[in-house]
Image (cartoon, helix red, strand yellow):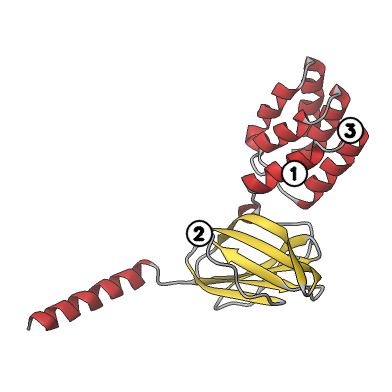
Amino acid sequence: MKKLFTTLAILSLTVIAQAAHPFQSALAITSVDGSLLTVSIDRAPFSNVSTNIYSDRLRAGNHYVKVMRLTGHPHRPVYRTVFAGYLFIPEASEVMAEVNRSRFRITGSRPFDYAPQVYEDPHYYPQHLRCEVDAYEFDQMIQSLGNYNFESTRMTVAKQLINNNYFSSRQVARLIQQMTFESSKLELAKYAYSKTVDKSNYFIVNDQFSFESSITALSDYIALRN
């Protein structure tokens, strides 16, 4: 009888646990150019390398996702980080993404019971799927910028990083710190605004300017964009 009660208790806990998270979701990542990928979700061990990676049984919510692409000679593989950050996975849905060389892109999201909703603009990301680059990757970017002596080169590289990633306002401020001239700082602040995930905090960037005229110019630029 005691064994029966124990079994019933375990079954009850299982039912409760399933009821708490009844709808599980999935993330599908495809390599467009045929390169091999490996993915880690919530810092779990990386998946086996493949051109198509499908992870199901995901709970709804934010998940830390790191996508790496295999490059180099087969006998001397090199893994290059394509994306590292948080993605929001809706409940009972499949989120679809693709990797094309060094670019990671969300292509669509669909509830399991409905037809897929495709985002046709390749530069459009649903707001809840935009995520800043993770701290480690960002520190690597800052170190890389510090390797260039010429301001024009640092500006070119910084814009390349901005084109391929999203940043927080504090991260943008650190990027601007890598510039010496006031005009360069203002140019970079304007350039990074559209790729900032927390635009309401963009006032943090103002601290990087030496002249009030730069703050006014940036405020005018933001007002035109909103």
Residue on which disc 3 sits: 149
Label pair 3/1, CB-CB below 8 angstroms: no
How far from the left and from the top, in percent, is residue 181? Answer: 86, 23
Q: Residues within 10 Å of mark 3 (few under 14, many from 20)?
A: few
Mark earlier in primary sequence (2, 3): 2
Percent coordinates x, y for residue 220 in the rendering: 80, 27
The answer to whether residue 48 is left or right of residue 218 is left
Amino acid type shown at disc 3: Asn
Residue toward you, 81 or 162: 81
Amino acid type assigned to the residue bearing label 2 in the image: Gly
Give the label, 2 or 3, closer to the camera: 3
Is the Cβ of the residue at disc 2 closer than 8 Å to that at disc 1? no
The Cα atoms of the two marked residues, 3 and 1, are separated by 15 Å
User: Where is the C terminus found, in terms of image quarters?
Assistant: top right
Q: Earlier in the sequence, mark 2 or mark 1?
A: 2
- Left-right relation of 7 to 2: right
In the rendered image, the quadrant that contains the N terminus is bottom left
Give the amino acid type for the residue marked by disc 1 in the picture: Met
Report helix, strand or loop for mark 2. strand
Cα gap from disc 2 to disc 3, whole angstroms: 43 Å
**Is the residue marked by circle 2 packed among few (<14), some (14-19), or many (20+) residues within 10 Å?**
few
Q: Which residue is mark 2?
A: 61
Say which of marks 2 and 1 sits in front: 1
Judge left or right: residue 43 versus residue 214.
Answer: left
Q: Which residue is mark 1?
A: 141
**Callouts 2 and 3 close, C-beta under 8 Å:** no
